[in-house]
Image: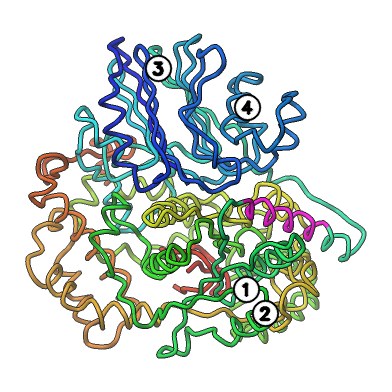
Amino acid sequence: MSGIAALLRLDGAPATPADVERMVATLAHRGPDGAGVWCTGPAGVGHRLLHTTPESLHERQPLASAAACLVLTADARIDNRAELIRALDLAEPAAAITDAALILAAYERWGERCPERLLGDFAFAVWDARRQALFCARDHFGVKPIYYHHAPGRLFALASEIKGLLALAEVPRGLNETRVADYLVPLLEDKAITFYASVVRLPPAHRMTVSRDGVRLEQYWALDPGREIRMKSDAEYAAAFREIFTDAVRCRLRSALPVGAMLSGGLDSSSIVCVARRLLREHHLAPLHTFSAIFPDVPQCDEQRYIAALVSEGDVEPHYVRGDLLSPLVDIDRVLAHEDEPFYAPNLFLHWELYRAAQAAGVRVVCDGVDGDTTVSHGLLRLAELAASGRWPTLAAESFALSRRLQQSPWRLLWRNALRPFLPQRVRATWRLLRGRSPLINRAFADRTGLAQRLRALDPERAPPPRTARQEHWRRLTSGLVPFALEIADKAAAAFAIEPRYPFFDRRLAEYCLALPSDQKLRSGFTRLVLRHALNGILTDAVRRRGDKSNLAPNFRRALLHFGRATLEDVIVGDGSVIAPWVDLTALRQVYARYAAGGADDAALPVWTGATLALWLRKQRSPTHAARSTIRPADVTRDSRFAPDPLKGEPSHGTREGSPHVEPRRTGTSGAEARL
């Protein structure tokens, strides 16, 4: 976790240190251990440093090449260090070579193709004076963020957070109405859009070159949905998984300071903790700190028995946060200030307090099991494969075994995962129509922004449904929800000078798991089968064999109303003018009335969405923001790609494991697959 910033004056004017310093100053929370600014001619780069790895203790950025024709700023952890040092023929001792130096050397050797040679989490920018171009790249899944603004012929700027761009007077603050519509649906598939019309995100696995000739954007890596691995036995599949997963955890334990890990009691976080503590013990390092949210007053959310089973085996230093005593709106002004946007992450308040606990414990690196179920995959569409191939006895056996383990109706499992994928398009379209649109959307606003057209283009539910486990696996791994969640977590962790690391988003692990046969993902009622086999004897058996997952939704619904009622009454029942241009206030107030009356389990998320949008817009209009970031209903822009054609007149299940967000809408998954 560090902060990066860069700007390029496309009109040839000089980049001033004062501009870069303003950008870097807004990112001070990301790097309390040092700051640097470098400017020459039209280009400037800046950096805020957070010490995490041993090599970073003697790091200084921005980093210039020997001839000073290349200058780098990077927020990075590079995992294939030994391989790169050999390939680049670097003579210095490995301990003296920083990750930033590796990236710069890689760019010197391979140019724009260097991201293809990097393994790890990274966001970086290189000013190349020889080409008068700025080159930048982002890691494979989007763990490290890059936001940028481009005014052709005038200015290009990038930063780790939006606030770094807003520090420049030339960056407009206009609201992007298209993003507001996405938020209210919600639709999170667009990997570039933000709430600011002039600010976009560099998508994961992309590189970008900027010069006076324009911006060139390319994808340098993609998962291959056609690749398949075939081995001789379950033991071989398990051994390969264990080797890759262990190395993914080992890479993320590289730290100069104490290391921590989230521990929910679920399969994903527990797998990380058990492997991590074994590795730390083998190297005689300090015990792993674990951070757990517990819910004694909401027993259906509480997993203390699984956490206790793991902690009792030793070699961890546990820390606990009472999740049932926290408000989802805790520190909301500070959270919004760090996120820079409304955030569709109702359970972020739990991660926020866990990051706070990690900071208090002196931890700077926290491993997290976010979306391990996405990477390994439950493989529920194996049922569709069995149905398509006519393997009826196996289909029946798997359905009933899965039903027993998940405690769900076998007929519901069959319908969702074996039959519905084969429904004709017309039937599925009718089903979607019956479900209707978001209750929050102001209909005139939806029509004005071309929301219907945008949904047809981006909504996964409008696409042909996957009919194999690998197709579904690929769709989830490449979903816009993945970088969206990682970006939210990045900014929340940065508030506490914490670097989150995600072993399940290791490129090698994702490629391996996607290529597995479906019976390595689901068999005999066990989902994520290969992980369970691989960690036999390592992962606490009570967790390894569990089939259920805790549901955090009851705690969220209870806490939002119990602790946040006064705020909800204020922004929803009170003066709603701040959201009236975009939200159907009558419908929102009716939903809130049902929620406040103690019923309507499905009402909490719409209430949360409307309330957080209102709180953010109020913050933008407050006197402290008025000079820099006022947003008015007229000061809006929408994405013209999805504007209605005037000639045509067109206009959860929450689960416990790791992730700081709630599934925004059903996308043909079972409750077992739904995100937190």
Numbered circles on residues, count: 4
**Which disc, if any, is residue 214?**
3
For label 2, the residue is: 543
Cα gap from disc 3 to disc 1, whole angstroms: 52 Å
Badge 1 marks a residue whose secondary structure is strand
Q: Amino acid at mark 2?
A: Val
**Could you say where residue 134 lies in the image, as x and y percent from the top left?**
45, 20
Q: Nearer the viewer, mark 3 or mark 4?
A: 4
182 left or right, relative to 240: left
Residue to which mark 1 is pinned: 316
Front of the two marks 3 and 1: 1
What is the span of residues highlighted in magenta in the rendered image?
240-254
Q: Position of residue 316 (x, y in %)?
A: 62, 73
Between circles 2 and 1, the one closer to the viewer is: 1
Task: Check if mark 4's residue and mark 2's residue have beta carbons within 8 Å.
Answer: no
Whole-number angstrom distance, CA of label 3 to CA of label 2 = 53 Å
Disc 2 packing (10 Å; few <14; some 14–19; many ≥20): many
Q: In this image, 393 relative to 352: left or right? A: right
